[in-house]
């Protein structure tokens, strides 16, 4: 007879309890790491360091040519937390670069408008590889110079003075339209 403190278990029951304990441990692990990287702790993913890009190759698991990512584009072996952080960082980097490009394009467009109005200082014309330079700006400068030269020749041909004395300074386009 066994003592009151001892429980006798058969092999099947013992194995079932061990399996249940393993399952509970897995569930505990999943709950602790769900949404967070298991490589670096809560809120700090490091799948890129441990798994790398692209993800691990798992032949036959995914449809298509690339067996290193799932159908969402997440690399195999990466947790969702790390993948979303990686995508967020990539998108922020692209946004920053695009924003810088838009700022430069605005500057180049303003240069084209200034050149078209003839308000460009000949001593301070932007040159290739400068921030405000563009092919459109260079072409506009060249066209405006050709226009000025044609106008000068026309005045010489017709005998008009280069600058009429009675001409009053006209308001610029910005004075009429406003700068905003």
Image: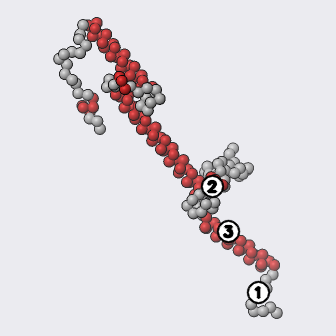
Residue 172 shows in this picture: yes
Which quadrant is home to the C terminus? top left
Q: Residues within 10 Å of mark 3 (few under 14, many from 20)?
A: few
Which residue is labeled 2 in the image? 47
Residue 116 shows in this picture: no
Q: Nearer the viewer, residue 9 or 86?
A: 86
Question: In the image, which is nearer the foreground, mark 2 or mark 1?
Answer: 2
Q: Residue at x 53, y 51 (%)?
A: 88
Q: Residue at x 24, y 7 (%)?
A: 159
Give the Cα separation between the discs numbered 2 and 1.
45 Å
Q: Residues within 10 Å of mark 1 (few under 14, many from 20)?
A: few
Q: Residue 79 appears in which quarter of the rendering?
A: bottom right
Q: Earlier in the sequence, mark 2 or mark 1?
A: 1
What secondary structure is found at the residue carrying circle 2?
helix
Q: Which residue lies most toward the front here?
A: 123
**Disc number at residue 7?**
1
Give the Cα separation between the discs numbered 1 and 3.
26 Å
Which residue is labeled 3 in the image? 26
Question: In the image, which is nearer the foreground, mark 2 or mark 3?
Answer: 2
Query: Residue 59: x and y, percent?
Result: 73, 50
Q: Earlier in the sequence, mark 2 or mark 3?
A: 3
Query: Residue 83: x and y, percent?
Result: 59, 53
Q: Residue 10 appears in which quarter of the rendering?
A: bottom right
Q: Residue at x 34, y 25 (%)?
A: 120
Whether residues under marks 2 and 3 lie with C-beta atoms below 8 angstroms apart, the answer is no
Query: Residue 44: x and y, percent?
Result: 57, 59
Compared to residue 118, the image places residue 22 above or below, namely below
**Disc number at residue 22?**
none
What secondary structure is found at the residue carrying circle 1?
loop
What secondary structure is found at the residue carrying circle 3?
helix
Q: Residue at x 61, y 56 (%)?
A: 46
């Amino acid at each position: 007879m066994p003592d009151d403190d001892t429980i006798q278990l058969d092999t099947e029951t013992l194995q079932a309890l061990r399996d249940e304990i393993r399952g509970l441990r897995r569930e505990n692990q999943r709950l602790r790491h769900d949404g967070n990287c298991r490589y670096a702790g809560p809120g700090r993913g490091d799948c890129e360091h441990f798994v790398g890009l692209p993800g691990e190759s798992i032949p036959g698991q995914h449809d298509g040519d690339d067996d290193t990512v799932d159908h969402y584009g997440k690399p195999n072996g990466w947790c969702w937390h790390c993948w979303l952080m990686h995508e967020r960082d990539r998108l922020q980097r692209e946004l920053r670069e695009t924003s810088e490009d838009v700022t430069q394009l605005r500057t180049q467009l303003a240069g084209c408008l200034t050149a078209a109005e003839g308000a460009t200082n000949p001593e301070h014309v932007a040159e290739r590889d400068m921030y405000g330079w563009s092919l459109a700006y260079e072409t506009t400068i060249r066209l405006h110079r050709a226009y000025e030269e044609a106008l000068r020749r026309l005045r010489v041909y017709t005998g008009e003075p280069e600058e009429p004395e009675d001409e009053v300074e006209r308001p610029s386009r910005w004075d009429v339209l406003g700068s905003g």
